[in-house]
């Protein structure tokens, strides 16, 4: 029997992710590129937190969580990592092409493997390590282009590359810290819902982002306010990006709790393809030639990395492997 609600979850998760990338890039273009990246990242979190608080205070919308101060402190590391991943992603997609930024971000499993092994002492199977080769190789190919004369040269912005790499690093730590949260006794019950957990994470992310925003772009805030008031493309896309960022992340969390790990892997892989191809079309970014080949190899590697342990027989001595997507 077809699960209609689950299909709607998938549809709006994909659409939300797609439109977020478009709105985020349009807001960055209106603001002059990466010139106000930290301000845009902070503004999106402000919109998301405002929406979360509205749901708590609105009649019959969503019950507020009943967490303790200790619970909040326990969630700070994951929240800070979420903030870092978000801010770096906004910078990456503002400084460079959306398609290339998403291709690099698809290499997150490589960072998750290294961080999980050397920082958190997790066991990663040999098969998973081998799957990182096509992921890394695909990203390298995607960074190249072949000119008409046959010569090959680099085809990316340094800001876009560095931002995406930093986002991957923070995302790897976020995944590990979020996994640790799941073992906190009674936390799930005190949260009340997946939506509440994401809302608290957004609040912590905002609190972590504001000081960095003040330090890096606070002196330009008046200039940004003027742009926000006079440029409807900036104001509209910033607000919409904040809402879609919150919405698609919450929907993604709800969706992934209803499906198996393998279906989860397929869904994440398909989502990346939709965003990469869709954004390339909207912003007229070329993904032909070496970039297309590299993208295909990278995405295939990501999918294989996600399912390889389910496909191969497990050794009796193997410990459970953390799956961070």
Image (cartoon, rainbow, N blue to C red):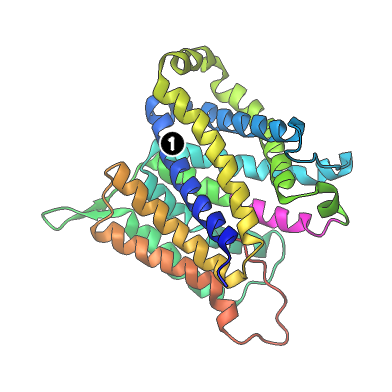
Q: Of 105 and 281, which appears nearest the observer? A: 281
Rendered location of residue 189, percent (x, y): 85, 53
Look at the magenta stretch and give its main secondary structure: helix
Q: Residue at x 80, y 47 (%)?
A: 191
Image position of 57 (left or right of 8):
right
Q: Of 133 and 319, which appears nearest the observer? A: 319
71 over 260 or under it: above or below: above
Visible in this render: residue 17? yes
Q: Of 76 and 24, which appears nearest the observer? A: 24
Rendered location of residue 265, percent (x, y): 54, 67
Quarter of the image with the N terminus is bottom right
Quarter of the image with the C terminus is bottom right
76 over 118 or under it: above or below: above
- Residue, far left: 149
The range drawn in magenta is: 171-184
Q: Name the residue under label 1.
A: 23
Kind of element beneath mark 1: helix
Q: Residue 118's quadrant in the figure? A: bottom right
């Amino acid at each position: 029997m077809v699960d209609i609600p689950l299909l709607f979850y998938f549809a709006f998760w994909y659409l939300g992710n797609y439109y977020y990338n478009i709105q985020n890039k349009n807001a960055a273009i209106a603001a002059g590129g990466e010139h106000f990246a930290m301000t845009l990242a902070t503004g999106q979190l402000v919109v998301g937190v405002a929406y979360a608080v509205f749901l708590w205070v609105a009649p019959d919308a969503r019950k507020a969580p009943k967490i303790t101060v200790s619970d909040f402190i326990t969630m700070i590391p994951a929240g800070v990592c979420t903030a870092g991943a978000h801010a770096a992603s906004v910078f990456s997609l503002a400084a460079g092409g959306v398609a290339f930024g998403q291709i690099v971000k698809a290499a997150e499993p490589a960072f998750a493997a290294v961080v999980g092994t050397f920082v958190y002492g997790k066991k990663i199977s040999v098969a998973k390590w081998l799957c990182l080769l096509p992921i890394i190789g695909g990203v390298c190919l995607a960074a190249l282009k072949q000119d008409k004369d046959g010569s090959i040269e680099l085809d990316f912005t340094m800001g876009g590359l560095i931002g995406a790499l930093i986002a991957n690093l923070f995302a790897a730590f976020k995944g590990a810290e979020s996994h640790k949260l799941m073992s906190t006794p009674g936390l799930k019950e005190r949260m009340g819902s997946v939506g509440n957990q994401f809302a608290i994470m957004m609040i912590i992310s905002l609190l972590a982002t504001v000081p960095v925003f003040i330090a890096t772009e606070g002196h330009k805030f008046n200039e940004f306010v003027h742009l926000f008031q006079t440029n409807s493309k900036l104001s509209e896309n910033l607000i919409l990006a904040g809402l879609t960022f919150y919405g698609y992340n919450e929907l993604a969390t709800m969706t992934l709790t209803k499906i198996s790990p393998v279906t989860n892997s397929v869904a994440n892989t398909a989502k990346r393809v939709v965003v990469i191809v869709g954004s390339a079309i909207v912003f007229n970014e070329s993904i032909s030639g070496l970039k297309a080949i590299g993208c295909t190899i990278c995405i295939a590697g990501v999918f294989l990395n996600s399912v390889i342990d389910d496909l191969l027989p497990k050794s009796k001595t193997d410990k459970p492997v953390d799956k961070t997507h």
